[in-house]
């Protein structure tokens, strides 16, 4: 399946196997996430995410900074080296998607896009799940994100709640 190929290709470009690719991609899209929100996005426990963050910090890929509103929490940001690693992860994802969809003509791509948008909006349960859905998303290509649109219609402000 194309989703398995995306995960496999993205992980092969990450500094380690597992959720590191998703963590780098999420932090590229949402700089300043808390460990709690990153944990939700990558599907790890809080303790597992702390260990992942520790490894990525020691490898010079991300850094912890003071949180803007919560003195107990830390916000996570990519370093310049982490940005390069994230770009490689996302480029490998793009290649898999391009290859997988290359058989479709423009009308078929539009139909697929319309159907995918409806399915994503219908399956979205809450803000936390949105991070899991979007963990390896093509943010530049998703200019009218159906997940963000659905959250907005439900009155959920992703920007206000990102660091919760």
Image: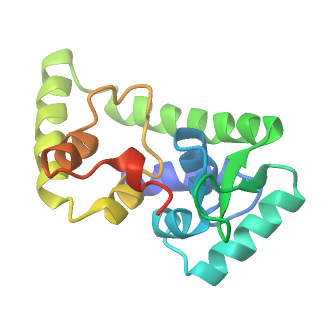
Report the label total.
0
Residue 31 or residue 98, whichever sits in front: 31
Q: Is residue 148 left or right of residue 58?
A: left
The residue shown at (75%, 34%) is 84
- The picture places residue 76, in percent across and down from the top left corner, at 67, 54
- The picture places residue 53, in percent across and down from the top left corner, at 73, 65
Q: Is residue 20 left or right of residue 65?
A: left
Q: Is residue 152 left or right of residue 131?
A: left
Q: Quadrant of residue 143?
A: top left
Q: Is residue 23 above or below residue 47?
A: above
- The picture places residue 154, in percent across and down from the top left corner, at 14, 52
Q: How is the image coloured?
A: rainbow
Residue 155 or residue 117, whichever sits in front: 155
Residue 30 or residue 24, whichever sits in front: 30
Q: Quadrant of the N terminus?
A: bottom left
- The picture places residue 144, in percent across and down from the top left corner, at 26, 28
The residue shown at (21%, 19%) is 105
The residue shown at (16%, 60%) is 123
């Amino acid at each position: 399946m194309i989703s398995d190929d995306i995960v496999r290709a993205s992980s092969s470009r990450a500094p380690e196997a597992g959720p590191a690719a998703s963590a780098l991609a999420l932090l590229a899209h949402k700089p300043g996430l808390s460990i709690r929100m990153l944990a939700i996005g990558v599907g790890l426990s809080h303790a597992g995410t702390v260990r992942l963050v520790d490894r990525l910090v020691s490898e010079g890929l991300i850094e912890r900074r003071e949180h803007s509103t919560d003195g107990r929490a830390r916000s996570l940001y990519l370093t310049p080296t982490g940005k390069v690693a994230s770009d490689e992860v996302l480029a490998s994802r793009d290649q898999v998607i391009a290859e997988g969809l290359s058989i479709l003509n423009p009308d078929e791509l539009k139909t697929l896009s319309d159907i995918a948008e409806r399915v994503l909006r219908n399956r979205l349960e809450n803000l936390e799940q949105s991070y899991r859905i979007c963990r390896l998303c093509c943010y530049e290509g998703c200019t009218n994100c159906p997940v963000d649109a659905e959250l907005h219609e439900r009155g959920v402000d992703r920007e206000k709640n990102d660091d919760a």
